[in-house]
Amino acid sequence: MDHPDAPKSCLYSKITRYIELDEFNARYLEELEAGEEVYPARRRLRRAKEKADALYIVRRGWLYSVRYLGGDRRHVKGLHFPGDVIGLSDVTLEACSADLITATDVTLCPLPKANLSAMFVNAPRIAGILFAFAAIESLIVSERLAVVSRLNAEGRIAHLLMQIHARLAVTRDIPDNWLPMPLSQEVIGDAVSLTQAYVNRSLKELEDQGLILRRDQGVELLDPERLKAIGEFEDRFQSIDSSWLPT
Amino acid sequence: MDHPDAPKSCLYSKITRYIELDEFNARYLEELEAGEEVYPARRRLRRAKEKADALYIVRRGWLYSVRYLGGDRRHVKGLHFPGDVIGLSDVTLEACSADLITATDVTLCPLPKANLSAMFVNAPRIAGILFAFAAIESLIVSERLAVVSRLNAEGRIAHLLMQIHARLAVTRDIPDNWLPMPLSQEVIGDAVSLTQAYVNRSLKELEDQGLILRRDQGVELLDPERLKAIGEFEDRFQSIDSSWLPT
DNA sequence: CGCGCGATTGAAACAACTCAACTAGAGTGG
DNA sequence: CCACTCTAGTTGAGTTGTTTCAATCGCGCG
């Protein structure tokens, strides 16, 4: 895969952005990421209640997971970007808790749950960093809960935009003021608990205020600082406390 | 502490409810839980931004963590019950992300982050189960996000009640239809994103419908099945997939 | 006995929803 | 190259669940 969006391993570059890996651990990680699966955009990869016997490392592309409540009400549980590990929060479940859908073309790399056991014994440092990633995922959800609970529509959307930007920036150099946006307004709404129509209005409002500009399947962040303020966003992804990790 | 609510170790009983621990791991766990701190109800134990260099195992009592958004808007990030490990989601942060407040008298047992490193190397099975607990915490938050996003006031409250009941039932035998409730309506509201006044109205409505009965600082669950249905609650805490844990 | 916090209740206001019609653009096939 | 279709985005008008503000009540506690 010599795709420009697909470096050797996004997970490796994400991990080494935070901590150092010695030769042994680097190789161990490489073997974990041996397999590779490619899927087109807008494809439902698996449904809730299906057996969940693998995690997936995202190598390229965006995905999201959705749950259905009360029949028709849809909720976007999470967004998944290159370098993310999908399914960390579901390890304790026999069956996965949400449908998994591709937003763009993606490349995934399956990591069978059965391999975790050996990893905890043989590569505790990698197990530790996975633990850290699970914690970060938890933090992200928790942040979204706070935002959905306490901010108005514009705040929620501003937060989402800045959070996505910050998460992408972990594995990739991206400009401070540009964000690709392959997600439909409906998906955005289901992520921050708004209707599609109101997402539209709020985006327009942000645009009218000169904070963003929508063009070319993306969003130009005209005033990142104000967007962060409106969305009460604080970037917690650019560095982590790794002092407690085994060496 | 020969308090009836304080068995030797809630964490031990929680863990062994899910998986088996051999002699070595049991002893390892016992040493982890050596210290003990006791605090009265309604006490702010620590504030956000303070240095977070320990996790806390809850041995007795209820706590909750709160964040403040936009000045005065308060959000309850999480509830903590006996057997829970506080701070799992914050391990990657230098400073903790929320204030920690006691709802009742509590007994805590500090677990310095610095000890985690050795744990990952020497007791991978315990590290694995902590990983599992972090995943469960993530699941809980995720569930709350879905519920707050997509259910009305009564649904949210019904969900909260059933979730608390299920979580308590993990470490303790409690009756199917009774729930102690030391949380004020304001705290409940801040947890499920409603105002105190509306929490009151919704509780009254649930009571009028014959689903609950409030008395003696608690809630009688007159119709648990309908409450689960209204709150779209599914109990995911009573058993876990532990096949991937190191032995 | 009075103080204070939490619960209860009412009335008015509003943010976001619903429903629905319309537009723009992207892809497809004749 | 143009009609056709389909999906996503835009906009309007009326509705509603929840909030806000405020007043009152009840009770545990010093």
Image: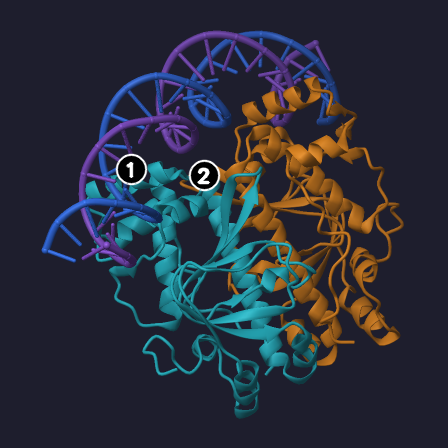
Chain colours: A cyan, B orange, C purple, D blue
Image position of A42 with respect to B149: above or below: below
For mark 2, does the 10 Å Cα neighbourhood hold few (<14), some (14 to 19), or many (20 or more) residues?
many
Which of the 4 image quarters holds residue B85?
bottom right
Q: Find disc 1 in the rendering and name its residue.
A: A201
Residue B143 visible, this angle: yes
* Chain identifier of the residue bearing label 1 in the image: A
Above or below — where is A138 with respect to A188?
below
Disc 2 designates what residue?
A150
Question: Mark 2 is on which residue type?
Answer: Arg
Give whichever of B10, A184 is nearer the camera: A184
Badge 1 density bin: few <14, some 14–19, many ≥20, Cα 10 Å: few
Residue nearest the viewer, comparing C24 with B179:
C24
- Quote the CA–CA distance across marks 2 and 1: 19 Å
Residue that appears at 65% across and 68% down: A53
Query: Residue sitting at 41 percent across and 66 percent down?
Result: A40
The residue positioned 80% from the left and 60% from the top of the image is B18
Subunit bearing disc 2: A
> How far across and down, in percent of the image, does residue D22 sit?
46, 13
Question: Do the numbered discs 2 and 1 sit on residues whose CB atoms are within 8 Å?
Answer: no
Left or right: B5, with D25 as reference point: right
Front in this rendered view, residue C9 or B27: C9
Amino acid residing under circle 1? Arg
Secondary structure state at the residue bearing disc 2: helix
